[in-house]
Image (cartoon, grey):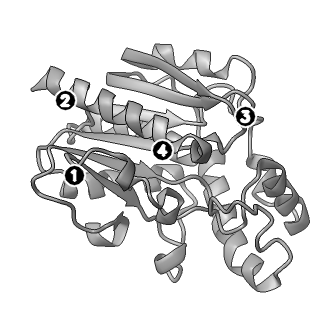
Amino acid sequence: MTGDWLRPAEVDPAARLRLFLLPYSGAGASAYHGWAALFPADVAVQAVQLPGRQDRLAEAPYTDLAALVEALCEVLDAECDGRPYGLFGHSMGGLLAYRVAVALERDGGPAPALVAPSGWAPEGFRTVADLVDAPDAVLVNRLAELGMGVDGSPDPRPDVGYHDPAVLAVALPTIRADLAVCAGYRDDRARLRGPLVTYSGAGDPLLAPGAVASWPTRSAAYLGDRRFPGGHFFLHEHALPIATDLAYLLDQQAAAVS
C-alpha cells in the first residue's frame, strides 16, 4: 500500500532519519523534484503522492480533510520503522502535516520528531472556499496570480497549460478537490506535544498579516518561523536553506528523544 503513496517507494535502510514531504494543492510528488539531493545521506527523503495526479491520475482525489488525514496516518503507521522522522508540507501540505501529527499523537501512532508546515497557518490563511466551485476562468486567473502552473508543477513559466483545454480538463478537477480539502478545515486550536517549526514567505498573499503569530500556541516546543523573501511559492526559490534547516532541526530533535 505505502508504495502507492511514496516516491521513491523504498529508501536506504541504513539512513538514520526519515523525512516525508507533503504537496500543495494540485501538485504531486514531483513538486519536490531534486529535494532529496539537498539533504545529508543519513536523511531518507520521500515525497507523498496523493491520488488523482501524475501516476495516480486514474484514482479519485480526496475531497474531505478528515478522510485524507486518516489515510495518511495509515500510510505512516505502516511505513514508519522506529527511525525518527519529520513531516514537511507546503500550503495544503502544511495543513496536512499539522493535522496528521495531531491525529498520530492523539491516537498513539508513530508521532513525528519534527513537524514543519510551510506557507500555511491555522489562523489567518485566506479562505479558498470560494474557488472550489468558481468558473474555470476565475480559478485559472487566481492560479496565475499566485504563480502556479495548472499542473501544480514548480514550472518557471507558471502560465504553462493555462490555454490548453486538454490540460485544464485533467488538472482542474484535482485542484478543485484539493481546495475542497483545505476549505473543510475547522480550527480546533489543537496543540502538538512535539516540536514544530514553520516557514513563510514575506510577500505571501494567502497569509493575512500576523497569521504566523497563531503558531506558537500550537506546540509545547515551537521552534520559530523562518521567513523568506517571496510570495506563496517562495519554497522553490529557497529550497536549499529550507532543506539545510530541516536537516539540522530533525537531527537535533531526534537526538533529544534518543
| Few, some or many residues within 10 Å of mark 4 (<14, 14–19, 20+) | many
Residue drawn at (82%, 83%), measured in percent from left and top? 165
Q: Residue at x 21, y 61 (%)?
A: 11
Earlier in the chain: of badge 3 and badge 2, it is 3
CA separation, marks 2 and 1? 18 Å
Q: Earlier in the sequence, mark 1 or mark 3?
A: 1
Front: mark 4 or 1: 4
Q: Are marks 4 and 3 in contact (CB under 8 Å)?
A: no
Identified at 77% across, 48% down, the residue is 146
- Asked whether disc 3 touches disc 2, contact meaning CB atoms under 8 Å apart, the reply is no
Per the rendering, the mark at residue 204 is 3
Residue 69: image x %, image y %? 42, 50
Q: Amino acid at mark 3?
A: Asp
As drawn, the label of residue 77 is 1
Dot 4 or dot 2, earlier in sequence: 4
Q: Amino acid at mark 4?
A: Gly
Q: CA distance from mark 4 to mark 1?
A: 18 Å
